[in-house]
Amino acid sequence: MPTFRVVDSSLLIEADHRRVLRALEKYLRSGPPAIAPPRVYEETVTEPRSIGFGASAARIEKLFKSGAVAIKPPDYTDSLVSTIVDRVRVCIADRAGKPEHAVERADLQIVALAIENARKGNQVEIMFRDSALKVCLERVLRGQGVSGVSIIDFRSLIRQLKHEPKG
Amino acid sequence: MAYVAAKGKATPEEIQKDLGIPRSTVYKLLTEFFQTGLVTKEKAGKVELVRVPDFVFRIENTANIVDCKLTPRNILAFDAAHTPAGRMFIGRRGLQAFAKFVELYDVYKRDRTTAQLMARELGVTRYEVELLLSDIDSITPRSLELANLPSRR
């Protein structure tokens, strides 16, 4: 059983788009504390609102305000957090054939948040869609001998929520 | 064809089951595809498999698309033009930007880029890219999510 869930923008946007955001809120509330970094708030509320997706932004903002997902900035004080984030950045940039700076550190705030909590002895579930990130994160975690982080592909969860009775 | 292309290979029975279309329609369509050479047959023991070989199908100089490369990996992304997110994206960003997204999706499916990098390259928000990815997932038969797609490295 995880002690923290780290939630990515992809999960929240998917849940809203598939009309299961309320069910996701219920699911997250019934489990361990769910956290997301400020970048996730920007990508799911601030940016969509600025380009005319106000209704969706409002629904996701409501989920944050309800406390189902708490916004928590990552802490890079632990040097291993920075090391892992930088190695994942390099790995993704290499795979994409891009310069290292093309992948911003802020892009990987969810990774930093997951590692920070795993290093404190927590079992962390990190939920996102990108396979490239999964490949790189698994590789770097293995290389650094970090345990306690489970990567969750949320598609089956969304399907499950879609078929649950509303209430 | 998009289904078989994305899956790599399938039996007519799998096509019928996964797509929920009548057997007679499956065989009628396959006959047409065999004739055009877009789909090939192969035997695996007693089972007959249908395969779409790895390909690059190029759309060039049409009225709305300057250039777009279709592959077995991104053909379902091209199909997403008809989904709500696809129509919205095309309406806001134009067909050429959508064609660029389709090309980037091939890279995405080879685990070589992320939604954030795609958004940056397209000059759009991650929100818009995630909506498209969500709709592509919704039109992808579930059996494909676990299938090994042909992958050109």
Image (tube, coloured by chain):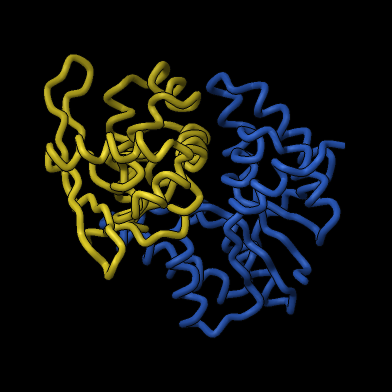
Chain colours: A blue, B yellow
Identify the residue at image location x=38%, y=42%: B118
Q: Quadrant of residue A59?
A: top right
Identify the residue at image location x=77%, y=71%: A1
Residue at the far bottom in the pictured view: A145
Determine whether, in the image, residue A155 is placed left or right of residue B65. right
Determine whether, in the image, residue B152 is placed left or right of residue B12. left
Q: Please tell me which residue lies in front, B34 or A120.
A: B34
**Is residue A64 positioned above or below B53 on the image?**
above
The x, y position of residue B9, in whole percent, is: 30, 56
Q: Please tell me which residue lies in front, B55 or A2.
A: B55
Identify the residue at image location x=43%, y=26%: B86
The x, y position of residue B33, in whole percent, is: 20, 38
Identify the residue at image location x=44%, y=36%: B21
Q: Is residue A64 visible?
A: yes
**Is residue B93 positioned above or below B108 on the image?**
above
Q: Is residue A96 visible?
A: no
* Quadrant for the N terminus of chain B in the image: top left
Q: Quadrant of residue B57?
A: top left
The x, y position of residue A159, in whole percent, is: 64, 47
